[in-house]
Image (tube, rainbow, N blue to C red):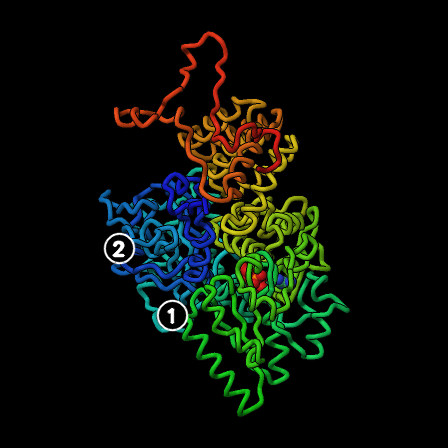
């Protein structure tokens, strides 16, 4: 195959740098999906525990972070910082790993010792560069968001006074609901309270308050992240008589729902009723549905693009089969060995022989098994020991053994439509408890879901998502439900984790206050390379074929469209350029001989400057070719010659003696070159035969085949 992966190509690896919304690392777009999968698994909440030493590294006084701050940890997951000696020590203020005295700390991400792709590793959030959100614990364990900008002298001074009058310092903090509450504390944290921390935390709050004279921007920071007196007192257990414990904030509940398994997994339907779309395959009165309903499950190959529901359908079948006391065993062809398959088969035989129980074997990504591995279960599918369900994104005619294929029913699943995607996303939105804002107003019909946190009694404003953000996500994820749900999850986590999640004016046209997830947020949560194009799969070949045919058909619009589909999807521009070189001769040929020069120049230009700049070179060349006159004369004639050679019976005719070179006397004596007429020596055209005798008079340009 002509395509090389970005990891093979240093040129490609620099394309489309994007930032991971979870760990903030910049990395090439081609790596973002693999990275995110790991990053979300490793740090579902977007951050993990900081190392204590680093977390207590001092901030450079008065210095602002030079890059966007990392998201705060989910409520309740932030461990207590030990604040000792009455002085407050803050997390690193800059993401550069510089300590307060200006000395550079150890780099947080040494190169991978194992030679693995560094982009596939999630950088340790414990490292200085990924900073620790500025949190300190209140006396009752509630983490108190500290200011980004803290004067160098104030914390110490404030801490000194606070150690004497902790409660009065605490009382000095202004009232605001914007901090984590008592209810967020983990039990582990509770027994770690001590007076010193109470004093230090109170001092921090008082010190932060003392900055009120600072510029407007500082005040805004404070309003967003500072603890309030009331909240502080509540968290310290100073609730007034008769005051009820506050409800947990809406954002905490939502955050907790996003912790752990990816949202796509959590939302995986368990029944056909919840399975959206794919009506041609599992709609009412389809063959598969009736087979499933009658519990007659044939061996199946589920073929469809990523995220369209192949695995989900297999799990629905599994649920159904378990009810009917069938065994369901899954293997992934990416990790299973032939011995694993043999074990499963052996067990299936035992189950069948001793308990008369059938086994359904689900093999994800079956195309990853080589032919001989596929052969291992062929006889067992044949005799009914196992019912095979294979899932593949690749055309099974090429990737699955013909013998196996003939024993399975191939079910073709399609990309999910935008409508189906919207339904799937709305289910997720609802179950997270987000409220949908349609043109600035909450749409209550879909808003509440099962989250009580959005009720008016919640102590924090609700979390909204724009209706058009859901629509955009439904369109952009290109029928891949996993991408859509991941995009939603990232957008929500990034927004809840940002420093300024609350802003009145962000909920436009709506008088309420809340966190708003906008269209832009979801766009950021998606990667275009994931959206449009599967570089390694069939789509790669489909798109290049569509480009070639559009140029051949002189349709400049379609040509540009297919070019953009590939490039925007992360295709290697050199792969496209190589195809253009081929097209120049194959389809334009001598109708415009300069086409070949154009194509080679485009190839070299792409090689020199890379993406994204080289896209316009390719676009120019593609349009030139679409508009150019076409001739397949040479291409056809050459094919005729090849056919002539292939079809020749017996030994190939010798090269005529007069055409042979005679570099030695012996060869001359043998007649090599004898009778050859050197054309430049003749004024008039020369009569001379150039083909072997038996082919004399043949015209490859007219003849169909030799
Ligand atoms: N038809 C559907 N209805 C509802 N949710 C769906 C549907 N299809 C997919 N999903 C959601 O998308 C997620 C991913 O789907 P699934 O794992 O079935 O995709 P797949 O086709 O097997 O993809 P891949 O080939 O990449 O493994 C599921 O966990 C589920 O939440």
Whether residue 153 sits left or right of residue 447 in the image: it is left
Q: What residue do we see at 42% from left, 59% from top?
A: 38
Residue 675 vs residue 316, the one in the foreground = 675
Classify mark 2: helix, strand or loop.
loop
Ligand 1's quadrant: bottom right
Q: Position of residue 438 (x, y in %)?
A: 70, 49
C-alpha separation, residue under disc 1 versus residue under disc 2:
36 Å
Q: Position of residue 23 (x, y in %)?
A: 41, 52
Does the CB distance between marks 1 and 2 fall below 8 Å?
A: no
Q: Position of residue 154 (x, y in %)?
A: 32, 47
- Comes first in the chain, label 1 or label 2: 2
Q: Residue furthest right?
A: 285
Q: Nearer the viewer, mark 1 or mark 2?
A: 2
- Can residue 234 be seen here? The reply is no
Q: Residues within 10 Å of mark 1 (few under 14, many from 20)?
A: some
Classify mark 1: helix, strand or loop.
helix
Residue position marked by numbered label 2 in the rendering: 113
Residue 163 vs residue 677, the one in the foreground = 677
Q: Is residue 562 above or below residue 107?
A: above
Q: What residue do we see at 54% from left, 50% from top?
A: 502
Whether residue 614 sits left or right of residue 391 in the image: it is left
Q: Position of residue 290 (x, y in %)?
A: 73, 74
Locate the C terminus by quadrant.
top right
Confirm or reject: label 2 Cβ below 8 Å from ligand 1: no
* Numbered tag placed on residue 189 in the rendering: 1
Q: Residue furthest bottom?
A: 354
Whether residue 149 sits left or right of residue 434 in the image: it is left
């Amino acid at each position: 195959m002509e395509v090389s992966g970005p990891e093979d190509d240093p040129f490609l690896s620099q394309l489309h740098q994007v930032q991971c919304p979870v760990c903030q690392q910049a990395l090439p777009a081609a790596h973002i999906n693999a990275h995110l999968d790991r990053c979300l698994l490793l740090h579902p909440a977007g951050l993990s525990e900081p190392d204590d030493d680093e977390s207590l590294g001092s901030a450079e006084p008065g210095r602002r972070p030079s890059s966007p701050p990392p998201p705060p940890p989910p409520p309740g997951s932030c461990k207590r910082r030990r604040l000792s000696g009455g002085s407050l020590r803050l997390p690193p203020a800059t993401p550069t790993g510089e300590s307060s005295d200006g000395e550079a700390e150890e780099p947080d991400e040494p190169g991978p010792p194992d030679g693995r792709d560094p982009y596939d590793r999630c950088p340790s959030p414990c490292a200085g560069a990924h900073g620790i959100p500025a949190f300190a614990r209140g006396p009752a364990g509630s983490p108190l968001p500290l200011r980004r900008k803290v004067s160098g002298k104030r914390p110490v001074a404030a801490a000194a006074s606070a150690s004497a009058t902790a409660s009065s310092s605490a009382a000095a903090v202004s009232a605001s609901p914007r901090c984590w509450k008592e209810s967020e504390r983990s039990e582990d944290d509770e027994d770690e309270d001590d007076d010193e921390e109470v004093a230090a935390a109170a001092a921090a709050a008082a010190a932060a308050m003392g900055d009120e004279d600072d510029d407007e921007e500082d005040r805004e920071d404070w309003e967003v992240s500072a603890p309030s007196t009331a909240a502080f007192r509540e968290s310290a257990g100073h609730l007034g008589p008769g005051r009820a414990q506050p409800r947990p904030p809406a954002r905490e509940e939502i955050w907790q729902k996003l912790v752990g398994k990816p949202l796509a997994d959590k939302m995986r339907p368990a029944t056909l009723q919840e399975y959206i779309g794919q009506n041609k395959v599992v709609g009412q009165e389809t063959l598969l549905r009736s087979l499933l309903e009658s519990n007659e499950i044939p061996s199946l190959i589920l073929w469809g693009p990523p995220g369209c529901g192949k695995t989900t359908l297999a799990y629905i079948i599994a649920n159904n089969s378990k009810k009917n006391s069938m065994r369901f065993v899954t293997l992934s062809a990416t990790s299973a060995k032939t011995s694993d398959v043999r074990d499963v088969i052996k067990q299936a035989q035992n189950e069948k022989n001793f308990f008369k129980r059938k086994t359904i074997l689900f093999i994800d990504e079956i195309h990853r098994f080589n032919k001989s591995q596929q052969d291992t279960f062929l006889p067992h599918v044949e005799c009914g020991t196992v019912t095979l369900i294979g899932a593949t994104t690749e055309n099974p005619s090429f990737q699955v053994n013909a013998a196996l294929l003939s024993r399975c029913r191939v079910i073709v699943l399609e990309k999910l439509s935008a409508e189906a995607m919207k339904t799937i996303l709305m289910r997720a939105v609802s179950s997270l408890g987000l409220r949908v804002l349609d043109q600035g107003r909450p749409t209550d019909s879909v808003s509440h879901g099962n989250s009580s946190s959005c009720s008016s009694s919640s102590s924090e404003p609700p979390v909204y998502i724009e209706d058009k953000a859901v629509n955009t996500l439904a369109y952009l994820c290109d029928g891949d439900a996993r991408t859509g749900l991941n995009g939603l999850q990232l957008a929500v986590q990034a927004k809840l984790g940002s420093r300024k999640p609350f802003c009145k004016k962000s909920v436009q046209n709506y008088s309420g206050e809340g966190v708003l997830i906008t269209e832009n947020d979801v766009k950021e949560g998606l990667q275009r390379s994931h959206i449009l194009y599967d570089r390694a799969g069939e789509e790669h070949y489909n798109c290049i074929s569509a480009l070639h045919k559009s140029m051949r058909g002189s349709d400049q619009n379609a040509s540009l469209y297919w070019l953009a589909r590939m490039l925007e999807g992360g295709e290697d521009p050199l792969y496209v350029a190589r195809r253009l070189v081929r097209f120049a001769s194959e389809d334009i040929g001598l109708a415009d001989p300069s086409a070949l020069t154009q194509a080679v120049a485009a190839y070299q230009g792409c090689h020199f400057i890379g993406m994204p700049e080289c896209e316009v070179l390719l676009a120019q060349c593609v349009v030139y070719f679409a508009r150019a006159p076409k001739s397949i004369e040479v291409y056809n004639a050459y094919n005729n010659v090849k056919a002539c050679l292939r079809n020749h019976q017996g030994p190939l005719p010798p090269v005529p003696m007069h055409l042979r070179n005679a570099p030695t006397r012996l060869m001359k004596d043998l007649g090599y070159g004898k009778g050859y007429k050197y054309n430049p020596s003749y004024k008039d055209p020369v009569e001379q035969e150039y083909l072997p005798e038996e082919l004399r008079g043949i015209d490859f340009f007219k003849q169909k085949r030799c």
